[in-house]
Amino acid sequence: APGGVFGQLPRDKGACLHLLRREMQARISRGSVLSCNLQYVFFTPFVVLLPEVTINYRHGLPVITLTLPTRRERCQFAVKPMVATVGAFLKDVQREDKGIVKAEVFATDGSKVSDATLMEVLLRNDFKLLINSTAYSVSPPVKDKLSSEHATEMEDIKSLIHRLFVALHLEDHQIRKERELLQKLDHLKEQLMPLEQMKAKIMDSADAKTSRLLWVGLALMSTQGGALAWLTWWVYSWDIMEPVTYFITYGSAMAFYAYFVLTKQDYLYPDVKDRQFLHYFYRKSKAKHFNVEQYNKLKEDVAEVFKYNYFSTSSVRESA
């Protein structure tokens, strides 16, 4: 307006906005502001329109247009509603204008919208955008809903794109992963090599001791049988030796039962041999400072590498 309360306004847009801002602050300090809402500030006798936030769809994507407070320029932000979040959108706005200290989004009932909310969810209803100390009421346009056939076609296209992406990039990823697994496998084998050599020596020693123990047991049983036969037929008679053999047999049964009580296992010769072998093995490992736990951990890591490589190779073949 050329006259009135504001006087002669300059033609320059920036100077005009600066003059309007100064006049608004002066009237607020004098208490001449009658009322205000989120988009308009009413003065006596003028009405000053604050810049609005508009949303339009372009090429299927929503474009949010707003006025940057520092430069007073209109800026457009194209968002991907299925991917972008409210927090990412607000960061883009603050990155565009360094003068924006505070940027938040509120629902129409005044509750704050989380930064993790997808823009697709936000654009379904009206909301309020707060930039610094200015709040804007935003009404997104109603987007036409996709028909069921169109939605099915879109899902098929997404599935096709996903399969193409897998076919183009999964093989390269598999090659890189396989190279990493081979490097890890070589490192594990380097650590296992000295342990394997030490383990082989300890196993040979334990196996030799176990075999000697078995032969000693056979020799003792043969000696016992020969002694009983000599006492029965050459020294005494069967009437005298029968009680002796009875108590020897009963003593053997008691020894077998005691073995079961102590080990919770039946006295079976293969199990006894394995148990004695492990006893010699762990005793020899302790003497040679062989770390059994470290060895087992390395063997498990090697097995996991082979297992992962097998399954990943199978998945690549299936996708191909």
Image: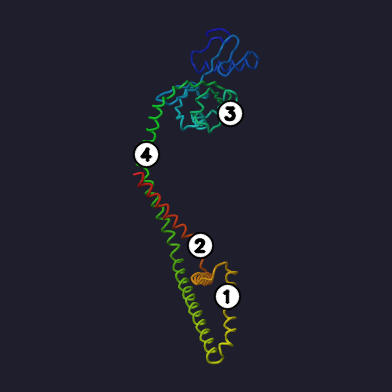
Residues at circles 3 and 2 in contact by the CB criterion of under 8 Å: no
| Rendered location of residue 11, percent (x, y) | 49, 13
Q: What amino acid type is highlighted by mark number 2?
A: Gln
Residue assigned mark 4 = 163
Disc 4: CA contacts within 10 A as few (<14), some (14-19) or many (>=20): some
Q: CA distance from mark 2 to mark 1?
A: 41 Å
| Rendered location of residue 240, percent (x, y) | 59, 88
Label whose residue precedes the other's in the sequence (3 or 4): 3
Q: Vertical placement of 290 versus 177: above or below?
A: below
* Model colouring: rainbow
Frontmost of labels 1 and 3 is: 1
Q: Vertical placement of 238 versus 40: above or below?
A: below
Q: CA distance from mark 2 to mark 4?
A: 43 Å
Secondary structure at badge 1 equals helix
Label whose residue precedes the other's in the sequence (2 or 1): 1
Q: What amino acid type is highlighted by mark number 1?
A: Ala
Q: What amino acid type is highlighted by mark number 3?
A: Lys
Q: Residue at x 54, y 32 (%)?
A: 115
Secondary structure at badge 4 equals helix
Label whose residue precedes the other's in the sequence (2 or 4): 4
Secondary structure at badge 3 equals loop
Residue assigned mark 3 = 112
Label whose residue precedes the other's in the sequence (1 or 4): 4
Frontmost of labels 3 and 2 is: 2
Residue assigned mark 1 = 253
